[in-house]
Image: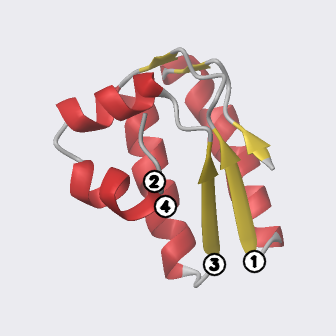
Amino acid sequence: MFKLPAELTISQVQACKNQLLELIDESDEIYLDDSDVVRIDTLGVQLLLASVHYIASKNKVLHWQSTSSVIIKSIEQLGLDDAILNKYFVTQI
């Protein structure tokens, strides 16, 4: 299970990316928990979008759990509903 940090912003993205890439390379199924996220910026959303596409390109399975309303609102505001929300979130807040 990979737990996203409370703030997924420019200052945390690189460290989060490195940890996430390591997990993706080591596992066939990736469990993502964003329940602690209270702040996300555009770079954080870009990391999530790039991650879901990378996971799909590696033919791995993504299980996204405890969806954060902050993430959902940011994704909707950026118009990425189809790319992320509608494809990867089973239940929306």
Q: Residue 28 carries which label?
A: 1
Q: How crowded is mark 1: few (under 14 residues within 10 Å), some or many (20 or more)?
A: some
Label 1 element class: loop
Q: Do the residues labelled 3 and 1 touch (CB within 8 Å)?
A: yes
Q: Nearer the viewer, residue 90 or 40?
A: 90
Mark 2 crowdedness (10 Å alpha carbons): few <14, some 14-19, many ≥20: some
The quarter of the image holding the C terminus is top left
Which residue corresponds to mark 4? Answer: 52
- Mark positioned earlier in the residue sequence (3 or 1): 1
Query: Cα distance, mark 2 to mark 1?
Result: 19 Å
Amino acid type, mark 4: Val
**Residue at image point 44% right, 66% down:** 53
Distance between the Cα atoms at labels 3 and 2? Answer: 16 Å
For label 3, the crowd category at 10 Å Cα-Cα, with few meaning under 14, some 14 to 19 and many 20 or more, is some
Which structural element holds mark 2? loop
Relative side of 56 to 36, left or right: left
Q: How crowded is mark 4: few (under 14 residues within 10 Å), some or many (20 or more)?
A: many
- Secondary structure beneath disc 3? loop
**Circle 3 is placed at which residue position?**
60
Whether tag 2 and tag 1 are in contact, CB under 8 A, the answer is: no
Q: Which of marks 4 and 3 is nearer the N terminus?
A: 4
Nearest to N terminus: mark 2 or mark 1: 1
Report the Cα–Cα distance between label 2 and label 4: 11 Å
**First in residue order: circle 2 vs circle 4:** 4
Which residue is depicted at the point 23% across and 36% down? 76
Which residue: 49% across, 80% down?
A: 57
Please tell me whether mark 4 sits on a helix, a strand or a loop: helix
The label on residue 89 is: 2
